[in-house]
Image (tube, rainbow, N blue to C red):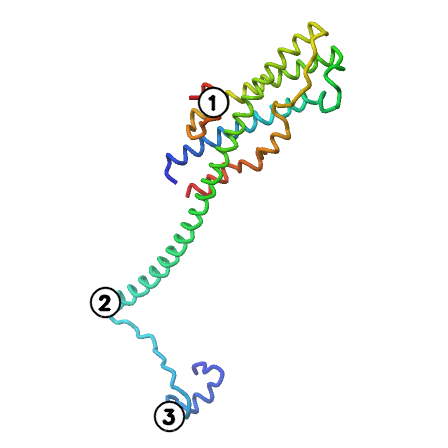
Amino acid sequence: MEPWAGPGGLVSEQNDAMGAADTPLPGEQAMEIHKPKPFHTLREFLKEYAIIVLGVATALAAEQTVEYLHHRSELRAVRIDLEEEKKLNIATFRHGAAMFQQSETYLKDYLATLRKALKDPAVPLPGCTCRWISSSARARSGRGPAQRRPDPDAARGTARQ
Amino acid sequence: MPPEEQRANDRLYLGLRTLDDDEGATFSAAGRAQAVFTSGVAPGELTLEEKRQLYRDGTELLARIEDVLVVQRVTIRFNPEFGGAAAPAGSR
């Protein structure tokens, strides 16, 4: 059975026949072709095998290193975000704590006056200075739950790793 | 993230989430209690029934505020860094 010569096989055969197969044309560089050598001993086999394993391991290690560095920079950014968010939460918490305390005091006084006004219609009811919590106060302090507190599971997911 | 830091963050978010829920209910109660004033009625013109309604709404609001103050105290207890000059009384 004749071996398949591929495209240009005829030319190759002709070149072979003329003994010109390895002779580069003028102005061309010769291409070096290393044919795979069959290994004859276990030692040769292990050597080839070790080279392949080492190459694959090196590529995997390089990929892991790149991923690790990328992940570390992401983690640093997340940690900075978490710290900023924590500071914001502390500030808004303190603001809210003060506001609720004032509201409690004010409301207690107001209800006491209102109780008197209910018993005695002559007692004037003061106008609402609305110092208790209002939606405007909430908006002013930026305490909308969605604005202030992201999903803790999401935060945990990114920060746990 | 070290487990201890993770637990601290979990505690913090749990406290804040609970606080958000309570505050939301309080803001709703405040809106109801203030409705009579935002409608433009002068306090002197309130009828007896309106005064009673205002008292009921105000009492409910006060209860909500006290709930929020309790949650704030608990939050500070588990997250000491939240305590400060404006922390609720008796929180330390």
Q: Secondary structure at mark 1?
A: helix
Which of label 1 and label 3 is nearer to you? 1
| Horizontal side, residue B52 vs residue B10: left or right | right
Q: Which residue in the structure is indicated by mark 1?
A: B73
Q: Earlier in the sequence, mark 2 or mark 3?
A: 3
Q: Chain of mark 1?
A: B
Amino acid on which the number 3 mark rests in the picture: Gly
Q: Give the crowd class for mark 3: few <14, some 14-19, many >=20 residues within 10 Å.
A: few
Are dots 1 and 2 on a single chain? no
Q: Which residue in the structure is indicated by mark 3?
A: A19
Q: Secondary structure at mark 2?
A: helix
Looking at the image, is A108 positioned above or below residue A131?
Answer: above
Q: Chain of mark 2?
A: A
Q: Which residue in the structure is indicated by mark 2?
A: A43
Q: Residue A157's spot in the image, x, y percent?
A: 47, 41
Q: Residue A83's spot in the image, x, y percent?
A: 45, 40
Q: Chain of mark 3?
A: A
Q: Nearest the camera: A20 or A61? A: A61
Q: CA distance from mark 1 to mark 2?
A: 74 Å
* Quadrant showing the N terminus of chain A: bottom left
Q: Secondary structure at mark 3?
A: loop
Q: Nearest the camera: A37 or A93? A: A93
Q: CA distance from mark 2 to mark 3?
A: 37 Å
